[in-house]
Image (cartoon, rainbow, N blue to C red):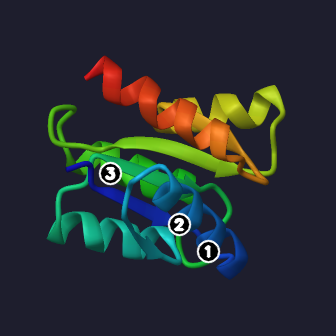
């Protein structure tokens, strides 16, 4: 079973990505900031984290850097950026932090499917 964590502060986007994931046959747990994502990851192993880049308390870039420092490559989830900022510099910052994929908001079903399938088949 694929375990998915979503870190997203917008309630509308939380509902949207959870709905899209359910349509693809996946369940997820949703938290509203990067600090809670790190706490949840310490409690439970996840295969994927869909990580909003801009959140209160701890943003997605900070949380990703923290996860990269806490977990070995074998033990850390694949982190996918969720952001409305789609410039090359934004993508570069996500990659530099350790994110493996990138989803532009608003998220679409086919984009979520493509990202999940890309990494499930590459494992």
* Residue 36, quarter of the rendered image: bottom left
Q: Please give the residue where the numbered disc 3 appears in the rendered image.
A: 67
At x 63%, y 55%, the residue is 53
Dividing the picture into quarters, in which one does residue 77 lie?
Answer: top left
Q: How crowded is the residue under tag 2: few (<14 C-alpha within 10 Å), some, or many (20+)?
A: some
Toward the top, the furthest residue is: 122
Find residue 108 and report its horizontal and vertical position in percent. Answer: 71, 47
- Mark seen at residue 18: 2
Q: CA distance from mark 3 to mark 2?
A: 22 Å
- Residue drawn at x 80%, y 51% as measured from the top left: 84
Q: Secondary structure at mark 3?
A: helix
At x 47%, y 63%, the residue is 6
Distance from the alpha carbon under mark 3 to that under mark 1: 24 Å
Residue tagged by mark 1? 15
User: Is residue 5 rendered to the left or right of residue 55?
Assistant: left
From the viewer's perspective, tell me whether residue 38 is left or right of residue 96.
Answer: left
User: Which quadrant: the C terminus?
Assistant: top left
Give the Cα distance between marks 2 and 1: 5 Å
> What SS does tag 2 mark?
helix
Whether residues under marks 2 and 1 lie with C-beta atoms below 8 angstroms apart, the answer is: yes
Q: Earlier in the sequence, mark 3 or mark 2?
A: 2
Whole-percent x and y of residue 11?
Answer: 66, 81
Q: Position of residue 8 (x, y in %)?
A: 58, 68
Work out whether 36 lies above or below 116: below
Q: Is residue 99 visible?
A: no
Q: Is residue 49 above or below residue 39?
A: above
**In front: mark 3 or mark 1?**
1
> Is the residue 101 above or below the residue 51 in the image?
above
- The secondary structure type at the circle numbered 1 is helix
């Amino acid at each position: 079973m694929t375990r998915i964590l979503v870190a997203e502060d917008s309630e509308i986007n939380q509902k949207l990505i959870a709905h899209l994931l359910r349509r693809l046959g996946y369940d997820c747990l949703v938290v509203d900031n990067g600090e809670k994502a790190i706490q949840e990851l310490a409690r439970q192993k996840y295969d994927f984290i869909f990580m909003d880049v801009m959140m209160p308390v701890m943003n997605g870039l900070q949380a990703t850097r923290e996860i990269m420092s806490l977990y070995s490559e074998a033990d850390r989830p694949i982190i996918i950026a969720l952001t409305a900022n789609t410039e090359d510099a934004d993508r570069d910052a996500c990659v530099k932090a350790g994110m493996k994929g990138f989803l532009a908001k608003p998220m679409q079903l086919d984009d979520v499917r493509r990202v999940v399938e890309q990494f499930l088949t590459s494992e």
